Image: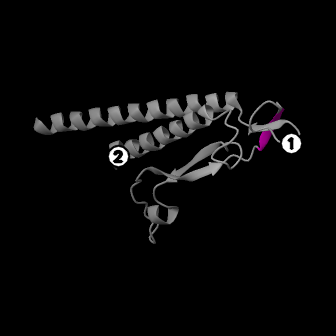
Amino acid sequence: MDAMAISRTALDVEWQRLQVIAQNLANENTTNAGGDGPYRPLRLVSGPDAGFEQLVDANGVQSRPVGVRVVGLEPLADGARRVHDPAHPHADADGFVTYPNLDRAAEMTLLIRTSRAYEANLTAMTIAQQMYMRALDLGRR
């Protein structure tokens, strides 16, 4: 089992998740995302790099884990919030502007959880490297 490679895949996934969260926060007040209406907040979906069938062969023997990967991006189904602002350039005929319905507190909580997961994987990678170096030192004796 290559612990450093597994941690590296997790670091990549968590970094991409941080980018999606930052994009959501940056577009919190985007009313017109390329002519398609308000910005739709996204969630990064991740999962194991190998399916269950690949991890367990026909004899019931488990193979080594290979890490995680990004499965895709899904828009949040929270809808939109409407604000009455007739002076806004994107206001409809009734004077309402449609904004993304983004929960800033939930996004910030997810940002903190994701950054801690990133740090945990970085720590795991560092410890694995120290273990490999110690094994090399023991092998030299």
Q: Quadrant of residue 138?
A: top left
Q: Identify the residue at image location x=49%, y=39%.
A: 14
Q: Is residue 48 above or below residue 93?
A: below
Q: Which residues are magenta?
A: 79-83
Look at the image and tell me in which quarter the C terminus lies. Answer: top left
In the image, 20 versus 106, the foreground residue is 20
- Taking depth in this image into account, of 48 and 58 the one nearest to the observer is 48
- Residue assigned mark 2: 5
Q: Residues within 10 Å of mark 2 (few under 14, many from 20)?
A: some
Residue 34 at what x, y percent from top left? 63, 47
Instruction: List the residue tagged with mark 1.
Output: 93
Q: Position of residue 66 (x, y in %)?
A: 40, 53
Amino acid type at circle 1 is Ala
Residue 65 image position (x, y, % from top left): 41, 53
Residue at the right extreme of this rendering: 94
Q: Which residue appears at 48% of the width and 42% of the height?
A: 16
Q: Residue at x 51, y 30 (%)?
A: 115
For mark 2, give the secondary structure.
helix
